[in-house]
Image: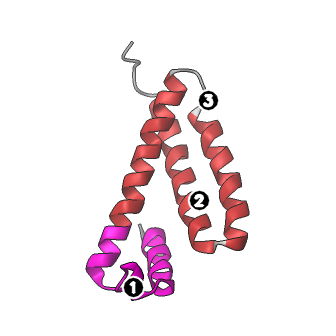
Amino acid sequence: MSLIKSLLTRFCRRQSPSEGFSGSDSGMLEIEALVQAHGDWLALLATILERERVITGAELARTLSEFAAHTVEDRPAEGQILSFWASRLNDTAATVGKFPSVH
């Protein structure tokens, strides 16, 4: 959780107030919730893709991690968020195999 907060702190400092980021705690919570929600959605999508045998969750996590590594060079905040999501996918992929299939 501290990684997200540090990312969001850096991200909010670089935004201008005219773009809707005041740097307040409530703004930080909204951005943190947005990052978490996107990560959860991505984990759900990865689970569906694995179930349909399109790509494994581990492979998707690995690919996103590589993408994050390249992104962080030019856009550090975005790269760190992508890295967080890759980690989230990796955790989900490790957990999904423990649950029985629905169909």
Label 2 element class: helix
**What is the crowding at mark 1: few (fewer than 14 residues within 10 Å), some, or many (at least 20)?**
few
Q: Which mark is residue 99?
A: none
Left or right of 9? Residue 90 is: right
The three-letter code of the residue at mark 1 reads Ser
Q: CA distance from mark 3 to mark 1?
A: 41 Å
In this picture, which residue range is highlighted in magenta?
A: 2-31
Mark 2 vs 3, N-terminal side: 3
**Percent coordinates x, y for residue 92 in the rendering:** 47, 41
Residue identified by numbered label 3: 55
Residue identified by numbered label 2: 83
**Percent coordinates x, y for residue 85 in the rendering:** 52, 54
Residue plotted at (70% across, 61% down): 69
Q: Which mark is residue 18?
A: 1
**What is the crowding at mark 2: few (fewer than 14 residues within 10 Å), some, or many (at least 20)?**
many
Colouring rule applied to residues:
secondary structure
The three-letter code of the residue at mark 2 reads Ser
**Percent coordinates x, y for residue 5 in the rendering:** 42, 74
Label 1 element class: helix
**Percent coordinates x, y for residue 29 in the rendering:** 30, 72
Mark 3 vs 1, N-terminal side: 1
